[in-house]
Image (cartoon, coloured by chain):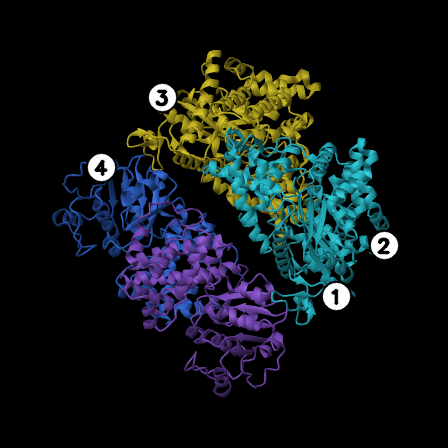
Chain colours: A blue, B purple, C cyan, D yellow
Amino acid sequence: MATRARTKIATRPPADTVGIVGAGSWGTTLAAHVAGAGHGTILWDVDPAVIREIHAKHTNSRSLPKVRLDRAIHATSDLGELASATSTLVLAVPSTAMRAVVTALGPHVRADHLVIHTAKGLEARQRRADDQIIRDETCCKRFGVLSGPNLAPEVLAQQPSATVIASRYPEVIETAQRFFVRPFFRVYGSTDVVGVEIGAAVKNVLSLAMGFVAGMGLGQNTRSLIVTRGLAEMIRIGVRMGADPATFNGIAGIGDLIGSGMSRESANFAVGELIAHGRKVEAAMREVGHFAEGVPTADALHTLLERAPVDAPLSRGVYQVLYQGAATSEVLESLMTRPPTMETNAHPTA
Amino acid sequence: MATRARTKIATRPPADTVGIVGAGSWGTTLAAHVAGAGHGTILWDVDPAVIREIHAKHTNSRSLPKVRLDRAIHATSDLGELASATSTLVLAVPSTAMRAVVTALGPHVRADHLVIHTAKGLEARQRRADDQIIRDETCCKRFGVLSGPNLAPEVLAQQPSATVIASRYPEVIETAQRFFVRPFFRVYGSTDVVGVEIGAAVKNVLSLAMGFVAGMGLGQNTRSLIVTRGLAEMIRIGVRMGADPATFNGIAGIGDLIGSGMSRESANFAVGELIAHGRKVEAAMREVGHFAEGVPTADALHTLLERAPVDAPLSRGVYQVLYQGAATSEVLESLMTRPPTMETNAHPTA
Amino acid sequence: MRALSPAEKEAVLIEVQSRVLAAKDALTERDPNFDLATVVNDALYHERRRLDTHRSSPTWKSDAAFWKGVSKRLSRASDRELRDILGSVIHRYLQEIIGNFDPKVYRVATKVIPYALSGLLNTMSPTRLLSGFDSLASLDDHLIVRGELDTISKLIEIGTVILVPTHLSNMDSPVIGYSLFKVGLPPFTYGAGLNLFTNPIIGYFMHNLGAYKVDRLKRDDLYKDTLKEYATYTLEMGIHNLFFPGGTRSRSGALERKLKLGLLGTGVLAYQNNLRNRKKKPKIFVVPCTLSYSLVLEAETLIEDSLKEAGKARYIITDDEFSKPGRILNFLRSLISLDSRIYVTFSEPLDPFGNRVLPDGTSVDHRGRPIDISRYVMSNGEVHPDEARDAEYTRELGDAVMRTFARDNTLLATHLLAAVLFQMCKERHPKLDLYRLLRESALQSEGFPLLEVHTRTERLLAKLKKLVKEEKVRYGEERLGWDAQAVVSEGLKLFGVYHTTPPATRRGDRVFPTDPGLLLYYSNRTLPYGL
Amino acid sequence: MRALSPAEKEAVLIEVQSRVLAAKDALTERDPNFDLATVVNDALYHERRRLDTHRSSPTWKSDAAFWKGVSKRLSRASDRELRDILGSVIHRYLQEIIGNFDPKVYRVATKVIPYALSGLLNTMSPTRLLSGFDSLASLDDHLIVRGELDTISKLIEIGTVILVPTHLSNMDSPVIGYSLFKVGLPPFTYGAGLNLFTNPIIGYFMHNLGAYKVDRLKRDDLYKDTLKEYATYTLEMGIHNLFFPGGTRSRSGALERKLKLGLLGTGVLAYQNNLRNRKKKPKIFVVPCTLSYSLVLEAETLIEDSLKEAGKARYIITDDEFSKPGRILNFLRSLISLDSRIYVTFSEPLDPFGNRVLPDGTSVDHRGRPIDISRYVMSNGEVHPDEARDAEYTRELGDAVMRTFARDNTLLATHLLAAVLFQMCKERHPKLDLYRLLRESALQSEGFPLLEVHTRTERLLAKLKKLVKEEKVRYGEERLGWDAQAVVSEGLKLFGVYHTTPPATRRGDRVFPTDPGLLLYYSNRTLPYGL
């Protein structure tokens, strides 16, 4: 499988060590964050070059150029080694790579591994959430999801931030809080795994819509209209999938939407803005230079909503723009011409 | 009292005519909005010069320079005339002038007048909401409140916007929708009058906090942390006052906070930013050139919270900065060092 | 009051039935998901449940047969048959509600009441049979009726009055009935619980007072609609009504904090119907009324029930003192022997929208300006029905009634002493929840120094004096003045004479909270004033 | 199974009582707001309510006296006395639960069962007394027991088994008991409702089957805790248990869609206790089991109840057929005379965490890799109790059980015909809600053309064939093959023989939905498959 990097693994007991799977910008940031608090940290990546660089130079120029990493971070490309030295694993891989990585991990993990994933969005092909992948491919049952408005550079800069760890297992919440809490970094617990996952997915799609609005030159009034309706839509979709509506009022819902979905630092927002200017989807992504997770998520969400119908005009509108050639202005107009209604007790009607 | 402007009043029946009280920028914008849809519109102001100018030149250079007003707008400074020609009144006066204007209106109104107010914030001296003032000073019972993320220039530019009319009387909601709905302007109904009023008040205070964060040079992560906690705090305060928590997920809660509280176009935000840079409150307001409603509201809210205790660290923090000389950095630090908790079912704990 | 002919009585039956049916028809038109079968099935379901669990009802057999018939006809009924069935259910409900109500008897009753009351007292105490009129006279001395009596006398001529009293005890209705008689006001009709009619004396008295029957065990909406429509129509007929707006007796001893708005809302409905029918005297006036007792007949049962509700499983209710004539007698004897008084205060009247009303019947706003109230129910110059609007007006009216209750409530020595002692219990156990507080307080053997009780009562009286001056509450112990020692000693005396376990007992120079639950009960009357 | 000595039986009482008490003590330590008085008061409250409303209980007098004593001791009990009272309540509960359960009798019962069953059949039909063994043999032919029988035989030796069947009818327990006997498996202990013991025949049978008593009218948490701890402990003793994880019989006729996780969670608890106590055979295996009947004894009552629950007031429950021996007899006679079968399918076993288990007792993950399951209950290498974690494991187990139910459910002609006909009713009245649909369908006089019923059944069979191939469901009419006409005719025949009103009736070339509620009931069995 992966080339074994011959370096010594931390000698701490597994219970005091976090294994981070994926040395992308967020995985590397998390490794730096955990190591910075003095916990044992092992970082795995499929790319042996990255592993070698971390060992040799304590940098990761592929994902976090210019950042100097803590020397205490151990790196490996051997999943067996990673699994045996830890009892907590954090999966920081993009949703597109999730299935492959977890399948490779399957033979190595034990029933006592706690697994935390951070990926956002719905797996495009199977439309199954990440926790279902863990269930399918490993024997692990105690898992959780970490999500929130956490831009990597701001976490590295130690700016005040908050995140949510959602799990049905209190042990997973406590463990995540033990590893991740720092004076500038708050970690809230939640038992609503589905809500946190849906929040992250819908947020990516709504960020595209926010980009459309900005690209059409519209101001604060329209933006807040989209956020409010977007929140209502997120709640409706979430409730349909079994989530607790209160989750969407929190860090992983409205917090994430505002924190990482309303500015050009979000790839989704930037891509949406260019699309409203008339660019094709692929051209927009090239120009922004980042992959927009919202693009496949809009497709996955659309499929999901066909099977479990929910009134979701914004998600449908984004899908129409991305996949059916609709103009952003048409979609906006169709939203505005619904008859006036009551804001219901549960949430505003859209 | 006011000088009588000798011009003919619209000959439409009162049921088809809106009386707007106060020719400030929002009152004048609403008059233009209603007249533009072809409804009878009478605009009252205490200042006879403004009335004369509207009649002579169809402009209001005091409040909306450069905007040309609809010729169909009738203006008057006679409250008796206004009351007898209408059965719907919209009070578009700042909260500081509310009591005086409503007291003057008292002798003229009838039991069948529908009264809609738009003022934001809590009356500083008495800490009573605007609807209580209407109850105290008039015989009118059918009233409502109009609130939402509506920047006047964007409404005049016909950008897509939404607002909420809250009333316990369906008739008031239907009437407001009849007068105000236009293709670019959605009017949602709500029965939660208290929620909409509290939302507007707390939003002004939170906008100051958002300004602090910007002024301290902090990024998206911190901003979203403040919004999420702010929403939770708004909900806690609202619920304590008898509001429906769902209101704060809507146009008048999170919508208004994001739409008119997160950019420098908001006087509160701009003043907060300057305070974080070290300016005194009055100096900041002078520099911004607008009165920040959040400043007296923070005081009124603080008094309210002393009588009805609610966990509201953000509102308390803003009060400490404005009135007790605390530094913005101190306040932020004290917020971050609370122990990690669960996001409860009701809302995130702060 | 004018008397109704038998034909007119029949007209009530027909009119109310047709109104309830018409309302259901309107709903059928408006809402495609609504159907009459649901209404009947709902009534059938609730009535069967009632019959299952309450087999001792005197009408059990006939009710069971009736509903069996309904069930049989229902299963394959056409829409038209459904409507007939519905009509027959409403009719049956109405017949029970109207009961023996006969306006002639009702009119005669006005003159019979004093004898009936005397009979009430005597029957319960056979040994006192011969001194009947004495005890009545004595009771009379102990009943203080005050307030806006002249205004109410005038309003009764100008329009129709709804009397809305606070509700503490099953004694309330006889006390109010007798108070009305005493000050020369006519009796009011009112809805009394079926259970009250089972006591033959009270039942007779109820009928003669003009009571109609309310079966609180009937839970279906159709019954509630029928009852409400019945009350509305009697108001339109000019019959003055009495409702207890709190619904039931206050369990906690506190003033009503939430009102049942259903019956209260009949005022705005009757007023609109009157306007539409161009009645000569369309106005409806709402008169709040507060009752104060030093001791409450059923205090023990009520507070137990209240604690059971709040704490769910912790307390279990036992019997009700009202079913024990001996208790009533004992209660009245205690009352009279100790020179204690019952206060009945008729408050300033309100209109159905919650505005104050002047003696000439004019409604005024907070600034005293007259209001043309017909405009409250108009849109574009027409009287216009609007259920949501009227519910809101009724909510405002309810708030105004509760404010009036607080203002005209009369505090007595027992309330003040209980407030002082319960506060002292709380301070001794600051961290316990209510249930453990009650348990611990009852167990403690030290008690409180009498001296401290005096000092605290003095402080409380000072605060109270200020509130009385500001007209925020009334004080009933003018006789004792503002003397703390007198108030404490009066309170202890009263506590000692009636309850099985006295709420508090003095032994030497110490006072013991012997029944902390009762202390809580009596002190709850002082809640709104922050004493 | 090993037999328990009387001393060991006493040990069960002591151990379970001390465990429940210890759990409450732990809660007292952890939560300052928790106190033992609340636990006792809660039990007192619920028991008094039960005694108030169910006076016919055979133990009424002794229960009432017991609780009166508790109430008396409670009012001024010290903390130590409270603990004693609590202990006595648990003890009383346990004595009732264990009842006549005697491991010796239990063991003997294994041999008695066939005679008992025969007795059951004969007692209900005195005229058949002499042909007892014939009808038993005949019943035997109609009972198809299949599935992972070998695996289960092995697992019974390796560890302790929890059998979790679907639940449709009060016939289920005798049917399962007899099935176990038939395939040579030992009987399982299980908790049967107290009401079942009132029927002397069934009651005797229950006891001998190893049933313990569950009083569903006892609603207090303490009782539930005691019951759960009892079940856990018997598992630890190696006694195989049977729970109906749906809690009660399916009202709608559908497969269980929500399981009661309380008893299911005893598996993970017993497993941990076994690990901690270093038992030789610590493993607990969970075996789902599905039952399929062409006709269900109580179908009419159950669907009525289901509709009543969903529609609240619209339907009223009447009697239960299980209390009528004539109905049972008639049912069995119909079953046998028509050559219809009852299918009992034992499914692939699961571990308490919801993983599949191989015949050698090894748990495997979705990819078939063996799992060291002891690590599921460990943190840092130690067995570590965690209530929330175990609740979650049990939820996963519940999901796995429900998936298994759907996969091993056996569909029969009556289910398929009902699905076809009910679908046709819905299409005829596409806009009606369920209640009006049922009413209208029963009233309609046209019926459906038999030809169309055949065509639609053919289409349904085609879909079903595919599902059966994919092992997503089972098909029970191999005898009839995939012939639509045969299935329709079999379904109509069965519908005609037992129910008071047949679900559907053929007249000439048309089929009439004569009882649409029953059609809904039988068609609900096909719900998970989107047929």
Q: Name the residue under label 4.
A: A85
Q: Which of marks 1 and 2 is in front?
A: 2
Discs 1/4, front: 1
Left or right, B197 with reference to C145:
left
Q: What residue type is labelled 2?
A: Leu
Residue receiving disc 3: D277
Question: Quick check: do tags 4 and 3 share a chain?
Answer: no
In the rendered view, does D223 fall on the left or right side of D350? right
Callout 4 amino acid: Ala
A18 sits to left or right of B126: left
Confirm whether residue A338 shows in the render.
no
Any mark on residue C276, and which? 1
Mark whose residue sits in front, 4 or 3: 3
Front disc: 2 or 3: 2
Q: Residue B213 carries which label?
A: none
The secondary element bearing badge 4 is classed as loop
